[in-house]
Amino acid sequence: MQIQTHTTTDRHGYSLRFSPFEPSHMLLATSQLYGLAGGGSLFLLAQSAKDDAQSSSLTELCRLEWSDGLFDVAWCPYAADIAATASGDGSLQIWSGLDAESALTEQTPKEPLLCLQEHKNEIYSLDWGEKWNYHTLLSASWDCTLKLWDCNRQNSITTFVGHNDLIYCAKYSPLIANLFASVSTDGHLNLWNSLDFAGKPLMSIEAHASEALSCDWSHFDRNILMTGGSDGLIRAWDLRKMRTHIFELYSGEFAVRRLACSPHSATVLASANYDFTTRIWDLERGESAQEINAQHTEFVCGLDWNPQQVHQLADCGWDAVTNVYTPQCLRNMLV
Protein backbone atom coordinates (compact mmCIF):
# COMPACT_ATOMS: atom_id res chain seq x y z
CA MET A 1 0.00 0.00 0.00
CA GLN A 2 1.49 3.33 -1.08
CA ILE A 3 1.37 5.90 1.71
CA GLN A 4 2.26 9.59 1.72
CA THR A 5 3.20 10.76 5.19
CA HIS A 6 4.24 13.82 7.17
CA THR A 7 5.58 14.25 10.71
CA THR A 8 4.84 17.42 12.70
CA THR A 9 7.55 17.38 15.35
CA ASP A 10 6.25 18.36 18.81
CA ARG A 11 2.75 18.84 17.40
CA HIS A 12 0.22 16.07 17.97
CA GLY A 13 -2.52 15.56 15.38
CA TYR A 14 -6.16 16.06 16.30
CA SER A 15 -8.07 16.68 13.09
CA LEU A 16 -7.60 16.93 9.34
CA ARG A 17 -9.75 17.84 6.35
CA PHE A 18 -9.22 17.56 2.61
CA SER A 19 -9.91 20.69 0.61
CA PRO A 20 -13.26 20.62 -1.26
CA PHE A 21 -11.60 22.66 -4.04
CA GLU A 22 -8.03 21.37 -4.47
CA PRO A 23 -7.80 17.53 -4.41
CA SER A 24 -4.16 17.45 -3.31
CA HIS A 25 -4.48 19.88 -0.39
CA MET A 26 -5.48 19.26 3.21
CA LEU A 27 -5.45 21.07 6.56
CA LEU A 28 -4.12 19.53 9.76
CA ALA A 29 -5.00 20.86 13.24
CA THR A 30 -2.46 20.01 15.96
CA SER A 31 -1.59 20.72 19.59
CA GLN A 32 1.49 20.77 21.75
CA LEU A 33 1.84 18.31 24.62
CA TYR A 34 -1.10 16.17 23.44
CA GLY A 35 -3.47 19.13 23.88
CA LEU A 36 -2.96 19.28 27.64
CA ALA A 37 -0.91 22.51 27.56
CA GLY A 38 0.89 24.82 25.15
CA GLY A 39 -0.11 26.16 21.76
CA GLY A 40 -1.48 24.79 18.53
CA SER A 41 -0.46 24.80 14.87
CA LEU A 42 -2.47 24.65 11.65
CA PHE A 43 -0.64 23.08 8.69
CA LEU A 44 -1.53 23.34 5.00
CA LEU A 45 -0.21 20.13 3.40
CA ALA A 46 -0.01 19.06 -0.24
CA GLN A 47 0.29 15.61 -1.79
CA SER A 48 2.99 14.82 -4.32
CA ALA A 49 2.07 15.04 -7.98
CA LYS A 50 0.69 11.82 -9.44
CA ASP A 51 3.70 11.46 -11.74
CA ASP A 52 6.09 11.73 -8.78
CA ALA A 53 6.08 8.05 -7.91
CA GLN A 54 9.30 8.36 -5.87
CA SER A 55 7.92 10.74 -3.23
CA SER A 56 6.31 9.31 -0.11
CA SER A 57 6.15 12.60 1.78
CA LEU A 58 3.48 15.27 2.03
CA THR A 59 4.72 18.82 1.46
CA GLU A 60 4.18 21.47 4.13
CA LEU A 61 3.04 24.63 2.31
CA CYS A 62 2.48 26.82 5.35
CA ARG A 63 2.06 26.76 9.10
CA LEU A 64 -0.02 29.06 11.31
CA GLU A 65 0.23 29.34 15.09
CA TRP A 66 -2.33 29.82 17.84
CA SER A 67 -1.78 30.34 21.57
CA ASP A 68 -3.77 27.25 22.60
CA GLY A 69 -4.25 23.76 21.21
CA LEU A 70 -6.24 23.29 17.99
CA PHE A 71 -8.71 20.39 18.14
CA ASP A 72 -10.70 20.61 14.90
CA VAL A 73 -10.66 22.27 11.49
CA ALA A 74 -13.21 22.88 8.72
CA TRP A 75 -12.85 24.39 5.25
CA CYS A 76 -15.21 27.14 4.14
CA PRO A 77 -17.50 25.53 1.54
CA TYR A 78 -17.60 28.59 -0.73
CA ALA A 79 -14.09 30.10 -0.54
CA ALA A 80 -11.08 27.99 -1.49
CA ASP A 81 -8.56 29.71 0.80
CA ILE A 82 -10.59 30.12 4.03
CA ALA A 83 -11.00 27.72 6.95
CA ALA A 84 -11.93 27.72 10.64
CA THR A 85 -10.29 26.07 13.64
CA ALA A 86 -11.52 25.17 17.12
CA SER A 87 -9.30 25.79 20.12
CA GLY A 88 -8.71 24.78 23.71
CA ASP A 89 -9.25 28.37 24.86
CA GLY A 90 -12.92 28.17 23.85
CA SER A 91 -12.53 30.25 20.70
CA LEU A 92 -12.96 29.74 16.96
CA GLN A 93 -10.51 31.24 14.48
CA ILE A 94 -11.26 32.00 10.82
CA TRP A 95 -8.10 31.99 8.67
CA SER A 96 -7.46 33.19 5.11
CA GLY A 97 -4.76 32.73 2.49
CA LEU A 98 -4.79 28.93 2.73
CA ASP A 99 -3.92 28.31 -0.90
CA ALA A 100 -0.70 27.36 -2.69
CA GLU A 101 -0.10 30.75 -4.31
CA SER A 102 -0.43 32.67 -1.03
CA ALA A 103 1.66 30.10 0.84
CA LEU A 104 4.48 29.96 -1.71
CA THR A 105 4.73 33.76 -1.90
CA GLU A 106 4.47 34.02 1.91
CA GLN A 107 1.29 36.08 1.63
CA THR A 108 -0.76 33.93 4.01
CA PRO A 109 -1.75 36.16 6.98
CA LYS A 110 -0.25 35.00 10.28
CA GLU A 111 -3.28 36.16 12.27
CA PRO A 112 -6.90 35.03 11.80
CA LEU A 113 -9.44 37.22 10.03
CA LEU A 114 -11.80 36.77 12.96
CA CYS A 115 -11.79 35.21 16.42
CA LEU A 116 -15.12 34.13 17.91
CA GLN A 117 -15.08 33.75 21.70
CA GLU A 118 -18.07 32.69 23.81
CA HIS A 119 -17.53 29.09 24.94
CA LYS A 120 -16.21 28.69 28.48
CA ASN A 121 -14.19 25.52 27.80
CA GLU A 122 -12.43 23.66 25.00
CA ILE A 123 -14.14 23.41 21.62
CA TYR A 124 -13.65 19.87 20.37
CA SER A 125 -15.82 19.90 17.25
CA LEU A 126 -16.47 22.32 14.41
CA ASP A 127 -18.62 21.98 11.29
CA TRP A 128 -19.10 24.55 8.53
CA GLY A 129 -22.54 24.22 7.01
CA GLU A 130 -22.98 23.38 3.34
CA LYS A 131 -25.94 23.83 0.99
CA TRP A 132 -28.69 25.26 3.21
CA ASN A 133 -26.36 26.35 6.02
CA TYR A 134 -23.31 27.41 4.04
CA HIS A 135 -22.82 30.66 5.97
CA THR A 136 -23.02 29.12 9.45
CA LEU A 137 -20.50 27.50 11.77
CA LEU A 138 -21.47 24.92 14.37
CA SER A 139 -19.27 24.50 17.44
CA ALA A 140 -19.45 21.87 20.20
CA SER A 141 -17.70 22.41 23.51
CA TRP A 142 -16.68 20.80 26.77
CA ASP A 143 -18.86 23.46 28.45
CA CYS A 144 -21.78 21.15 27.48
CA THR A 145 -23.20 23.58 24.90
CA LEU A 146 -23.30 23.93 21.14
CA LYS A 147 -23.33 27.27 19.38
CA LEU A 148 -24.44 28.37 15.92
CA TRP A 149 -22.49 31.24 14.38
CA ASP A 150 -22.94 33.47 11.34
CA CYS A 151 -19.36 33.87 10.09
CA ASN A 152 -20.10 37.54 9.30
CA ARG A 153 -21.03 38.34 12.92
CA GLN A 154 -18.98 38.49 16.10
CA ASN A 155 -21.67 36.97 18.33
CA SER A 156 -23.34 33.57 18.14
CA ILE A 157 -26.88 33.21 16.80
CA THR A 158 -28.08 30.45 19.13
CA THR A 159 -26.78 28.44 22.08
CA PHE A 160 -28.05 24.85 22.23
CA VAL A 161 -28.40 23.16 25.62
CA GLY A 162 -29.33 19.50 26.08
CA HIS A 163 -26.25 17.48 27.03
CA ASN A 164 -25.14 16.86 30.61
CA ASP A 165 -21.45 16.31 29.92
CA LEU A 166 -18.61 17.11 27.52
CA ILE A 167 -19.64 17.34 23.85
CA TYR A 168 -17.12 15.71 21.53
CA CYS A 169 -18.72 15.91 18.09
CA ALA A 170 -21.49 17.69 16.16
CA LYS A 171 -22.31 17.31 12.48
CA TYR A 172 -24.80 18.82 10.06
CA SER A 173 -26.85 16.38 8.01
CA PRO A 174 -25.63 16.63 4.40
CA LEU A 175 -29.08 15.68 3.07
CA ILE A 176 -31.68 17.26 5.40
CA ALA A 177 -31.91 21.02 5.75
CA ASN A 178 -31.20 22.53 9.19
CA LEU A 179 -30.74 19.18 10.97
CA PHE A 180 -27.62 18.37 12.97
CA ALA A 181 -26.55 15.68 15.43
CA SER A 182 -24.28 15.74 18.47
CA VAL A 183 -22.78 13.19 20.86
CA SER A 184 -21.41 13.58 24.36
CA THR A 185 -19.67 11.78 27.19
CA ASP A 186 -23.15 11.52 28.73
CA GLY A 187 -23.62 8.69 26.18
CA HIS A 188 -26.43 10.45 24.35
CA LEU A 189 -27.07 11.21 20.69
CA ASN A 190 -29.07 14.42 20.29
CA LEU A 191 -30.80 15.71 17.16
CA TRP A 192 -31.36 19.45 16.69
CA ASN A 193 -33.05 21.94 14.37
CA SER A 194 -30.64 24.80 13.67
CA LEU A 195 -33.61 27.15 13.17
CA ASP A 196 -35.03 26.44 16.65
CA PHE A 197 -33.72 29.45 18.52
CA ALA A 198 -34.98 28.00 21.81
CA GLY A 199 -31.92 25.76 21.58
CA LYS A 200 -33.55 22.52 22.77
CA PRO A 201 -33.02 19.08 21.15
CA LEU A 202 -35.65 17.53 18.89
CA MET A 203 -34.73 14.13 20.29
CA SER A 204 -32.26 12.65 22.76
CA ILE A 205 -31.45 8.93 23.00
CA GLU A 206 -28.89 6.89 24.91
CA ALA A 207 -26.62 5.79 22.07
CA HIS A 208 -23.96 4.11 24.22
CA ALA A 209 -23.87 2.95 27.84
CA SER A 210 -20.47 4.67 28.04
CA GLU A 211 -19.13 7.88 26.50
CA ALA A 212 -20.17 8.74 22.92
CA LEU A 213 -17.25 10.43 21.16
CA SER A 214 -18.05 10.53 17.44
CA CYS A 215 -20.85 10.66 14.89
CA ASP A 216 -21.27 10.99 11.14
CA TRP A 217 -24.08 10.96 8.59
CA SER A 218 -24.48 8.80 5.51
CA HIS A 219 -23.91 10.73 2.29
CA PHE A 220 -26.43 8.51 0.45
CA ASP A 221 -29.34 7.72 2.82
CA ARG A 222 -30.81 10.77 4.52
CA ASN A 223 -32.13 8.69 7.43
CA ILE A 224 -28.89 6.99 8.48
CA LEU A 225 -26.22 8.18 10.88
CA MET A 226 -23.49 6.47 12.90
CA THR A 227 -22.15 6.90 16.43
CA GLY A 228 -18.94 5.66 18.02
CA GLY A 229 -18.23 5.24 21.71
CA SER A 230 -15.56 4.56 24.31
CA ASP A 231 -16.98 1.01 24.42
CA GLY A 232 -15.31 0.35 21.05
CA LEU A 233 -18.69 0.04 19.33
CA ILE A 234 -20.06 1.73 16.23
CA ARG A 235 -23.85 1.89 16.05
CA ALA A 236 -26.06 2.78 13.10
CA TRP A 237 -29.31 4.68 13.60
CA ASP A 238 -32.35 5.22 11.37
CA LEU A 239 -34.28 8.47 11.88
CA ARG A 240 -37.54 6.60 11.16
CA LYS A 241 -37.11 4.19 14.11
CA MET A 242 -34.82 5.56 16.76
CA ARG A 243 -35.85 3.26 19.63
CA THR A 244 -32.76 1.15 19.06
CA HIS A 245 -29.78 0.95 16.70
CA ILE A 246 -30.25 -0.96 13.45
CA PHE A 247 -26.84 -2.65 13.56
CA GLU A 248 -23.60 -2.62 15.53
CA LEU A 249 -19.92 -2.97 14.57
CA TYR A 250 -16.99 -3.83 16.82
CA SER A 251 -14.04 -1.46 16.36
CA GLY A 252 -11.63 -2.82 18.95
CA GLU A 253 -11.11 -2.86 22.67
CA PHE A 254 -10.69 0.90 23.05
CA ALA A 255 -12.62 4.04 22.12
CA VAL A 256 -13.78 5.06 18.65
CA ARG A 257 -12.50 8.63 18.43
CA ARG A 258 -13.74 9.55 14.95
CA LEU A 259 -16.02 8.17 12.24
CA ALA A 260 -16.11 8.95 8.53
CA CYS A 261 -18.80 7.69 6.16
CA SER A 262 -17.48 7.50 2.62
CA PRO A 263 -18.72 10.12 0.13
CA HIS A 264 -18.05 7.60 -2.67
CA SER A 265 -19.85 4.45 -1.50
CA ALA A 266 -22.97 3.98 0.62
CA THR A 267 -21.52 0.89 2.29
CA VAL A 268 -18.00 2.09 3.17
CA LEU A 269 -17.10 3.46 6.60
CA ALA A 270 -13.84 4.21 8.44
CA SER A 271 -13.04 4.67 12.13
CA ALA A 272 -10.09 6.20 13.99
CA ASN A 273 -9.43 4.45 17.27
CA TYR A 274 -7.61 4.71 20.57
CA ASP A 275 -6.03 1.29 19.96
CA PHE A 276 -3.72 3.08 17.45
CA THR A 277 -5.62 1.71 14.42
CA THR A 278 -7.74 2.94 11.54
CA ARG A 279 -10.38 0.42 10.46
CA ILE A 280 -12.28 0.24 7.17
CA TRP A 281 -15.59 -1.52 6.56
CA ASP A 282 -17.49 -2.35 3.42
CA LEU A 283 -20.86 -3.39 4.81
CA GLU A 284 -21.67 -5.31 1.63
CA ARG A 285 -18.97 -7.75 2.72
CA GLY A 286 -20.13 -8.22 6.30
CA GLU A 287 -19.89 -6.68 9.75
CA SER A 288 -16.17 -7.32 10.33
CA ALA A 289 -13.61 -4.70 9.35
CA GLN A 290 -12.13 -5.49 5.94
CA GLU A 291 -8.89 -3.74 6.84
CA ILE A 292 -7.12 -2.75 10.06
CA ASN A 293 -4.24 -0.32 9.55
CA ALA A 294 -1.84 -0.11 12.49
CA GLN A 295 0.47 2.60 11.17
CA HIS A 296 0.36 4.78 14.29
CA THR A 297 2.02 4.42 17.66
CA GLU A 298 -0.45 6.59 19.57
CA PHE A 299 -4.17 7.44 19.59
CA VAL A 300 -5.59 8.04 16.09
CA CYS A 301 -7.70 11.20 16.33
CA GLY A 302 -8.24 12.62 12.84
CA LEU A 303 -9.88 10.99 9.83
CA ASP A 304 -11.23 12.19 6.49
CA TRP A 305 -12.10 10.89 3.01
CA ASN A 306 -10.94 12.94 0.05
CA PRO A 307 -14.19 14.11 -1.64
CA GLN A 308 -12.41 14.46 -5.01
CA GLN A 309 -10.24 11.34 -5.00
CA VAL A 310 -12.21 8.09 -4.86
CA HIS A 311 -11.49 6.02 -1.70
CA GLN A 312 -8.50 8.11 -0.65
CA LEU A 313 -8.29 8.36 3.14
CA ALA A 314 -6.19 10.41 5.55
CA ASP A 315 -5.59 9.91 9.26
CA CYS A 316 -3.51 11.59 11.97
CA GLY A 317 -2.64 10.84 15.56
CA TRP A 318 -0.93 11.78 18.77
CA ASP A 319 2.31 10.32 17.38
CA ALA A 320 2.57 13.49 15.21
CA VAL A 321 2.22 11.41 12.02
CA THR A 322 -0.25 12.10 9.18
CA ASN A 323 -0.88 9.46 6.52
CA VAL A 324 -2.68 9.64 3.15
CA TYR A 325 -3.48 6.38 1.34
CA THR A 326 -6.08 4.29 -0.45
CA PRO A 327 -7.06 1.28 1.70
CA GLN A 328 -6.02 -1.99 0.09
CA CYS A 329 -9.49 -3.48 0.56
CA LEU A 330 -11.03 -0.73 -1.62
CA ARG A 331 -8.59 -0.79 -4.51
CA ASN A 332 -10.73 -3.25 -6.47
CA MET A 333 -13.59 -0.71 -6.28
CA LEU A 334 -11.61 2.02 -8.07
CA VAL A 335 -13.02 2.99 -11.45
Image: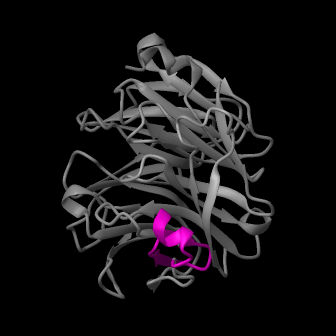
118 above or below 267? below
| Residue 104 is a magenta residue | yes
Can you say whether 232 is above or below 104 in the image?
A: above
Task: Give the image quarter of residue 195.
Answer: bottom left
* Horizontal arrangement in the rendering, residue 41 relative to residue 258 (left or right): right
Looking at the picture, how far across and down is residue 305, in whole percent? 47, 40
Image quadrant in which you'd find residue 308: top left
- Front-most of residues 286 and 327: 327
Q: Position of residue 172 (x, y in %)?
A: 33, 54
Q: Is residue 268 left or right of residue 185?
A: left
Residue 140: give x, y in percent of width and height.
47, 66
Q: Point out the stretch of residues depicted in magenta.
A: 84-107
Q: Is residue 114 left or right of residue 157?
A: right
Q: Pinpoint residue 274: horizontal percent, then vertical percent.
A: 70, 42
Quadrant housing the N terminus: top right
Magenta includes 194? no
As drawn, the residue found furthest toward the top would be 285
Q: Residue at x 76, y 76 (%)?
A: 38
Picture residue at 50% right of the left edge, 62% below the top:
73
Q: Is residue 164 visible?
A: no
Looking at the image, which residue is at 44% across and 75% down? 96
The answer to whether one can see residue 235 in this image is: yes
**Which image quarter holds the C terminus?**
top left
For the image, the number of numbered tags is 0
